[in-house]
Amino acid sequence: MRAVGPTSSGSADWPGLGATLAGFDDGRLAGLLALRPELARPPPRDLPALASRAGAWPSARDCYLALDRAGQHVVEALCLLPQPALLTELATLLDVAVDDIELEAAVSRLEDRALAFRLPADGAQGARARLLPALRQVDYPARLGPPLASLLGSLTGPGLDQMARRLGLKPSRIMAETTASIAGMLADQAVVDRLVKEGPAGTAELARRVAVEGPLVSVQHGLYGVTDQTASGWMVNRGLLAVADYYTAVMPREPAIALRDGRVFPPACLRRPELQPTAVDAAAVDRVAAERAMKVVADVVAILDHWSSEPPAVLKAGGIGIREVRRAAKAVGRSDPETARVIELAAVAGLAEVDLLAGIALPTAAYDEWLALESPDRWAWLATSWLGAELHLSLAGAISTKDKPIPPLLGRGPERDATRRRRLVMGVLAGAPPGTAPGRRAVGERVDWDSPGAWAGGPATPAALVSWALEEAELLGIVGLDSLATAGRAILSDNPQDAATSLSALVPPAVATFVVQADLTAVIAGAPAASVRAELDLLADVESQGAATVYRFSEASIRRAFDAGRTTDLILGFLEDHATRGIPQPLAYLVADLGRRFGNVRVGAVTSYLRSDDPALLAEVRQARLTARLRLRPVAPTVLVTDVDAATVTSVLQAAGYLPAREAADGSLLLARPTARRAATRSFGAWRPAIEPDLPSIVADLRRTPLPAAAPPAAPPVDPESLRWLQATLSGTERPTGIAKGSREVRSLLEMACEEYWVIRLSYLHSNGHASELTVEPTDINTRNLLATCFPRGDERRFVVDRIEWARVLTEAEEELL
């Protein structure tokens, strides 16, 4: 295989990005703006402005990260090859044929995004490809470190000689020869294998892991003073690792390739992984998914109904404590992590919220709207909310770095790429034919290949993030038996109504009838209809839930119905309409007795008064021991008054066994159903969708302002002797190695640095006459000024070019340390 070395550059064969974009036709230019939408926001004023955006590192980096794995491999291979690279060399490095269809497709995708460009054949040479200069800043292409020679340059002569002796080499008096001998030896696969086998325990495992996963190694106790007793020390002393900083080492390029059996990229690196799904029963998938869907709907109802009357307290640090999660888990029959996900699901669906002022969690007003829906529509609400949620549900309940579960409702901000990751995983399942189930490992490999940049920087490893998305989909019933259900496909198509209709055909219809038993309980087999459930919640208390729901009638629950305005006839009429076996006598007698007694005593405000048509009853109330603290006094045979407020009088009389009714100012009954507690709705302003740019109009505007023709600079003839240094240093090398001191040499070096994104060390003469040495990255240069980013602070400064006394380009090793 051709050796992978540092990149060289020439620009005579490429007119530049602006001229290249000017050669695009309108359709291709509009396609570029569609593939890289940040280039069109705001619309560029002309083609040079578009080229400046497209060629800048931030935009090029984001586009590179959004590529699939094949596109990224081609970019990394071009980073490792001299520019422009022959397509035959590119194919050899990627271990594919030059006419490979995957290679052709990957290069075409790069061209469509203006990240690389194919150049015509030049004489005897074949077709070539040139990478966008900004992309040569990609960190560690192909997960390879810098060349060994650049890393060994930081060693002193004695240190280099000592390393050579450890490798069995005889040091030369010339350091460059010793460096070349070490680099050649560590590029030999047999030598590297022998060295890692001879090292202390763990050396071989560490070496092969770093060679595959990436060049950086974190050393817990630091690298200085390392010895051969540790794996990292053994490798540093023999050049298999080089010191990057106190706690970090980097593996050079040559031994890494040797440890990869001479390959830079893995075999078939451009080929998209196959899913190879297995066949499953589509009807069974839908049944299992429907069961899970109804389970999660019932669990949300059970948890939030309990919170309506007994809201959980919020921890000082935020979120719901583990005790409240376990209490909810016991009620719904789930594990603690699953219950935490259900609670987080209710929050992202807008059904629950933390009341920060009260320090409790409550259902929201939207929960009442959600309860009025039928069960399939409730599920569609939850599933749609989950699909668009900007956070990972499974982070709630997961174990944190402090070995404690992360509480739900923690008030986390939007998490980067959460929605995109969920869509990617579900998209792979949707791509499999109905009635098939791709394995979880295959799904993970496919999404990692399609969008490798989406899985970096997440709250967990890529494998865990994929697993979270699949587990959440199973929890919701979008997935069953590792296959996408019919209702789930409708949700992914943004059609919740079809999803609810599909689910309705698989779940039993809502039950509007129940059986009332002599022990004052009512049993509903199945999910009650919304109207029936609302009335039963008023008349009775839920005793148990599951396949059947059991309600219990009591004097307190019936009195609650009378307080809400129900009458004896209305209550008995509802029971007769829905009780399939009639109303047992004990319940009928209880309702009739309470209806007859309700309102016989009425409470008003004097602060408060009691009024009754039965003087004997009022006398009894006044003399009762339990009502003595009310200090009732008569103002008429049928009226008692007190200084205590009406609410307290009512509660005291109820506790004493009476059934008082509140009276309005006009003498009518003051009836009110007790309202469930709800969190206050917070308003964040109206959401405004992003305005999509009009790409044809932008392209037309760009055409109206053509690219200015390049004019030769008006400069005096250049003395060949004055540029001898630059010509010598640029001839056949990647970057100059000497120091530029003349004004023309300095300017030429700075112009090249702007194009090649080199970091420069320079001496600058300030206005006060003092000179200082600075490390900068030039970004733009004109006839007078240099605009550059200064290190290590990263601030941008403007320098007068004529005040730069000398300049030199940092080596790759110096840039790595920087």
Image: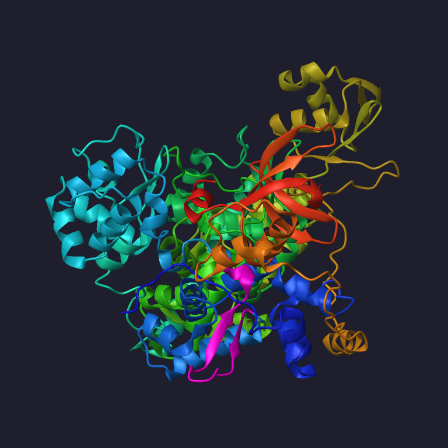
377 falls in the magenta region: no
Residue at 67% across / 66% down in the picture?
51
On screen, residue 137 above or below 540: below
Q: Measuring from the top left, give residue 104's x and y in whole percent.
A: 44, 81
One can see residue 386 in this view: no
Please give the range of residues in magenta. Answer: 115-136
Q: Is residue 318 visible?
A: yes
Q: Residue furthest right?
A: 666
Q: Is residue 361 left or right of residue 235?
A: right
Question: Dividing the image into 4 quarters, which one contains the N terminus?
Answer: bottom left
How does the figure colour the protein chain or chains? rainbow
Which is nearer the eye, 569 or 196? 196
Q: How many marks overall?
A: 0
Q: Image check: 56 left or right of 665?
A: left
- Which one is nearer the viewer's eye here, 211 or 626? 211
Give the camera-side residue of 253 and 436: 253
Query: Going 46% across and 65% down the picture, which residue do you hit?
Result: 451
Q: Position of residue 437 (x, y in %)?
A: 34, 73
- The correct choice, above or below, for 45 with respect to 782 in the image is below
Q: Residue 145 appears at what percent x and percent y?
A: 36, 52
Dividing the picture into quadrants, the one containing residue 607 is top right
Please name whichever residue, 5 or 520, is drawn nearer the observer in this view of the structure. 5
Q: Is residue 635 above or below residue 306?
A: above
Say which quarter of the image contains residue 649.
top right
Residue 322 is left or right of residue 369, and the answer is left
Percent across and percent down for residue 484 are 42, 72
702 displayed left or right of 359? right
